[in-house]
Amino acid sequence: MTTRKLRWGIISTGKIARTFARALAQSETGELVSVASRTPEGVSAFAAEFRVPHAHESYEALLADPEVEAVYIATPHPWHAQWAIAAARAKKHVLCEKPLGMNHAEVEAIVQAARDNDVFLMEAFMYRCSPQTRELVRLLRSGTLGRVKGIQASFGFDGAYPESGRLLNNELGGGGILDVGCYPVSMARLVAGIANGELFSEPLELYALGHVGTTQVDEYASAILKFPGEIVASLATAVRLWQDNSVRIFGSEGRLWLRTPWHPAHEADHSEIVIERPKREPEVIRVSAPGPLYGYEIDAVRAQLEQRQAVEMSWADSLGNALTLDRWRRALGVRFAADQAQA
């Protein structure tokens, strides 16, 4: 029996919204029926490009649109909580770009709104829904590395951005930790959790160093985390320093390498996981991924709609991720307006 497609609306029309719209155009489980922007020109151009039936010049109008069942929130970080909560109160299911909130308190408020209004909610870590990550979890559960002892994960870049731009603007939640450091944190918590027989794990200790620039955001930073089971993770992130952008996992019987952990199979129909063991040739596992990367999270939402949350990124997982990001930022003295509001 064919499942009816979920009808989506997109809030905001930036680069990530366009990426999501392209995935929806290829999706067998979702369709784009509505879009909203605060600029008439922006929403008009987006609607024309993707042939969206309903174009709204306010986010409130989209949330009032009876055709919309689920909302993808693609605004900058500081507005995630406002519109995720508003969407939940409008009885719309919610897929919100990472980070779900500016801090743990905001994520708590978003989760509570989803619970109170009985709607689906997921933080949009698209890599968590990819075939590569599913295969990684399978391999770790099978004991292919023996006992996991170490994790290295990094995500960072140097785009020579102006200080007024979003990535270096404190008022817009700039800095590496919140924008892309959330990926290594989520991966380390996932791997440590699987190694401990759980879905994710929380760090017992966290130590961090980094460089905070003149705009009071972290430009590059590293953290050492210790998890239950004597697992140690080394994480790095940046918006002004190019990183390795890979994941390595070290076990008692071998090591595993993800060359492209965050955008697997982005430019191909497959990705590769490399496993190395002492005195043996490396094993390369080819993971097929024929669909668009963002299509996997669209499918995950539709498949788990009735459960109101997804196993790939549950509410408890998002809450734990936010708490760890708070600890990392706090270690460097990076604060945002949202933190001050919660103080």
Image: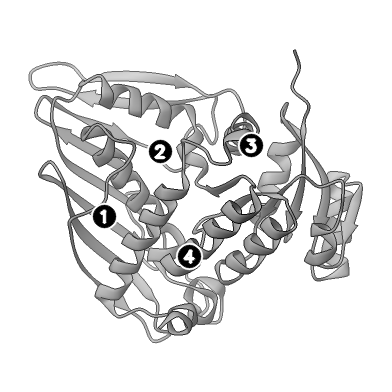
- Point out the tag, 1 or 3, that comes first from the N-terminus: 1
Q: What residue is shown with label 4? A: 159
Q: Is residue 29 visible?
A: yes
Quarter of image, res 90: bottom right
Tell me, for residue 235, which label it has, or none.
1
Which residue is more in the foreground, 161 or 207? 207
- Secondary structure under tag 2 reads loop
**Inter-mark Cα distance, 1 to 3:** 28 Å
**Inter-mark Cα distance, 4 to 1:** 20 Å
* Amino acid bearing label 3: Ile
Q: What residue is shown with label 2? A: 260
Is residue 61 left or right of 299 when viewed as pictured?
A: right
* Amino acid bearing label 4: Gly
Determine the residue positioned at 47% across, 62% down: 108
- Point out the tag, 4 or 1, that comes first from the N-terminus: 4
Local crowd at mark 2 within 10 Å, few (<14), some, or many (≥20)?
some
* Amino acid bearing label 2: Thr
Mark 4 or 3: the one toward you: 3
- Secondary structure under tag 4 reads loop
Which residue is more in the foreground, 106 or 164? 106
Above or below residue 194? Residue 87 is below
Q: What residue is shown with label 3? A: 298
Q: Are marks 1 and 3 in contact (CB under 8 Å)?
A: no
Q: Are marks 4 and 1 in contact (CB under 8 Å)?
A: no
- Point out the tag, 2 or 3, that comes first from the N-terminus: 2
Mark 2 or 3: the one toward you: 3
Count of number-bearing discs:
4
* Amino acid bearing label 1: Leu
Q: Is residue 103 visible?
A: no
